[in-house]
Image (cartoon, helix red, strand yellow):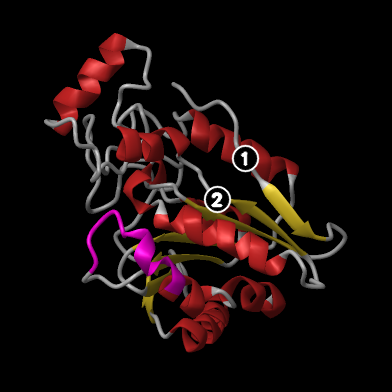
């Protein structure tokens, strides 16, 4: 357990509708963190009709492992375990946090029921030993309890799709379809109704807080993980107006 804080930026005002925008929950997908840092800079001079909470890096320890390996970890036993799991000192394909738990399957929403869930320590898809076990997720849940939000966007990579409609039907599903259509008109991505997914941040917020919560997969499926920074400009160009459009849809 290394990461003990959650770093959040807020722009706009706190008197009306609020959204939370998150990235970097999967370590090798840190292109989403870089995208959100550019997005904060882009939007900070706008006169916003609401407020935006940005959490650009949900998984700082995992991202550092992808970039630097595990030498920064002081716990020698943990370091040895991580090297055994990864079967290499190259952590470029690592998705989990420094406890080898995949944060985006650890939330307590149909926990452990996902089609790709893993029930042992792994570089990806391990659900943890119990739901909401990880300090990163605990911190996020404390943040959500303290700050009312009306919608959520989670940025991942890759595939150029937008997931929506977790466990949803009827009028609410129609409303989300309309919203996701507006998003996909801007970035040209494909809307996909969420299925076989559980324990995710968007799943949790959609199901328990009854708010629109979309997951956006940045970058072409033809790119390799981790997506190189040389593609950041193109990703930013396609998606820079998404956050503001979403806020204005609410």
Task: Name which quarter of the figure residue 188 lies in.
Answer: bottom left
Which is more toward the observer, 164 or 47?
47
Question: Considering only vertical position in the picture, is 247 above or below 88?
Answer: below
| Part of the protein shown in magenta | 223-233
Question: Considering only vertical position in the picture, is 188 above or below 208?
Answer: below
The extreme left residue here reads 87
Q: Decide: few, some or many residues near mark 2? Use Cα within 10 Å; few <14, some 14-19, many ≥20.
A: many
Please check the rendered image and state whether residue 224 is part of the magenta-colored stretch, yes or no: yes
Determine contact: label 2, label 1, CB under 8 Å: yes
Q: Position of residue 77 (x, y in %)?
A: 27, 11
The residue singled out by tag 2 in the image is: 56
Q: Where is residue 56 in the image (x, y as percent from the top left)?
A: 55, 50
Picture residue at 59% right of the left edge, 34% below the top: 139
Left or right of 131 in this view: 129: left
The extreme front residue here reads 230
Q: Where is residue 186 in the image (x, y as percent from the top left)?
A: 51, 85
* Quadrant of the snapshot with the C terminus: bottom right
Q: Where is residue 210 in the image (x, y as percent from the top left)?
A: 61, 61
The extreme top residue here reads 76
The residue singled out by tag 1 in the image is: 7
Task: Name which quarter of the figure residue 125 lies in.
Answer: top left
Picture residue at 21% right of the left edge, 16% below the top: 80
Please check the rendered image and state whether residue 170 is part of the magenta-colored stretch, yes or no: no
Can residue 112 be seen here? The reply is yes
Q: Decide: few, some or many residues near mark 1? Use Cα within 10 Å; few <14, some 14-19, many ≥20.
A: few
Which is more toward the observer, 204 or 91?
91
| SS of the residue under disc 1 | loop
Can residue 194 be seen here? The reply is no
Picture residue at 83% right of the left edge, 57% below the top: 14
* Quadrant of the snapshot with the N terminus: top left
């Amino acid at each position: 357990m290394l990461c003990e804080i959650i770093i959040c930026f807020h722009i706009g005002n706190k008197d009306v509708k609020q959204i939370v925008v998150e990235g970097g929950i999967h370590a090798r997908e840190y292109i989403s963190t870089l995208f959100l840092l550019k997005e904060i800079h882009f939007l900070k001079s706008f006169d916003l009709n609401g407020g935006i909470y940005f959490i650009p890096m949900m998984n700082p320890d995992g991202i550092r492992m992808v970039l630097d390996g595990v030498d920064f970890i002081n716990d020698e036993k943990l370091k040895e375990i991580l090297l055994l799991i990864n079967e290499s000192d190259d952590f470029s394909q690592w998705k989990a946090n420094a406890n080898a738990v995949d944060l985006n399957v650890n939330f307590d929403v149909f926990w452990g029921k996902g089609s790709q869930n893993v029930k042992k320590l792994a570089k990806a898809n391990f659900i943890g030993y119990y739901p909401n076990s990880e300090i990163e997720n605990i911190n996020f849940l404390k943040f959500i309890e303290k700050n009312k939000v009306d919608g959520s966007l989670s940025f991942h990579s890759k595939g150029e799709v937008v997931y929506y409609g977790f466990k949803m039907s009827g009028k609410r599903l129609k409303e989300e379809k309309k919203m996701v259509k507006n998003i996909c008109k801007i970035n040209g991505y494909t809307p996909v109704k969420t299925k076989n997914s559980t324990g995710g941040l968007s799943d949790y917020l959609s199901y328990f807080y009854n708010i629109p919560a979309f997951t956006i997969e940045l970058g072409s499926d033809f790119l390799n993980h981790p997506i190189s920074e040389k593609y950041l400009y193109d990703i930013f160009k396609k998606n820079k107006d998404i956050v503001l459009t979403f806020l204005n849809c609410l």
